[in-house]
Amino acid sequence: MEQILKYFPDISERQRRQFEMLDGLYHDWNAKINVISRKDIDNLYEHHVLHSLSIAKATRFKAGTKILDFGTGGGFPGIPLAIMFPECQFKLIDGTGKKIKVATEVANAIGLDNCQPVQLRGEEEKGKFDFVVSRAVMPLPDLVKIVTKNIVKRGNNVLPNGIICLKGGDLQAETAPFRNIVEVTKISNWFDEQWFKDKNVIYLPA
């Protein structure tokens, strides 16, 4: 929690309580259904919650914004973002039922009423959204092919509607087809922990 408050000191008491509850809930559920590496669960706040919240540093979603979390796994980045933006609507999809069960139980336990986890493959999603977010689910060109149909072209945010994803490593090959429009921002611009050194936020307008 200290890391969350370090970078987001102005969160409300409700948001603080919701973030605090994530630790016990994910430890408990991860013991039953493995959605986070057993070696990594103790790094929950840095490697999962704060990593997800780098999107909240890249942009501030306006109230009423609709966001699809594609391949959410156990609820990342969707659940931390839904806590951070309570006036936005989040749909979290994943093809694996047990992962969606964890995301659903966590969201319910912390009273997250702007978050809807659903077991669904991306190809089957028919809804329309302002933004699609994801965390290292698949190469960017493959993601674009699947979710372009789901993004509304007109938006009300400062950032034009599009795709925002979290990725690490060498991104030259997968961003090359979009080199004139893609924006790659180092997360280390915002967070000073060593773990974020090779992590990036990728933004691709619709």
Image (cartoon, rainbow, N blue to C red):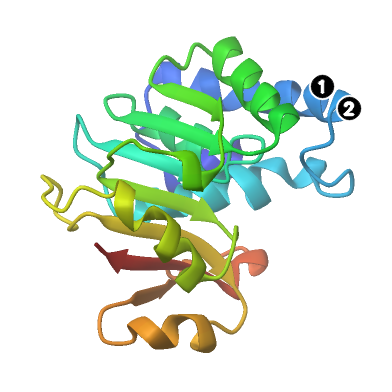
Residue 145 place in picture, x, y as percent: 42, 64
The correct choice, above or below, for 6 with respect to 185 in the image is above
Q: How crowded is mark 2: few (under 14 residues within 10 Å), some or many (20 or more)?
A: few
| Residue depicted at 34% across the width and 39% down the height | 67
Asked which secondary structure carries label 1, the reply is helix
The correct choice, above or below, for 179 with respect to 114 in the image is below
Residue 18 place in picture, x, y as percent: 53, 21
In the rendered structure, the answer to whether residue 113 lies left or right of residue 139 reads left
Asked which secondary structure carries label 2, the reply is helix
| Residue depicted at 28% across the width and 35% down the height | 66
In the rendered structure, the answer to whether residue 152 lies left or right of residue 66 reads left
Q: How many labels sit on residues?
A: 2
**Residue 45 - label:** none
Identify the amino acid type marked 1: Asp
Which image quadrant is residue 57 in?
bottom left
| Residue depicted at 41% across the width and 68% down the height | 202
Marks 2/1 in contact by CB < 8 Å: the verdict is: yes
Q: Is residue 86 visible?
A: yes
In the rendered structure, the answer to whether residue 193 lies left or right of residue 67 reads right
**Residue 31 - label:** 2
- In this view, the residue in front, 134 or 22, is 134
Q: How crowded is mark 1: few (under 14 residues within 10 Å), some or many (20 or more)?
A: few
Quarter of the image with the C terminus in it: bottom left
| Residue depicted at 59% across the width and 35% down the height | 75
Which image quadrant is residue 90 in?
top left
Q: Can residue 191 be seen in this view?
A: no
Query: What distance separates the C-alpha of mark 2 from that of mark 1?
Result: 5 Å
Identify the amino acid type marked 2: Ala
**Residue 28 - label:** 1
Residue 125 place in picture, x, y as percent: 43, 39
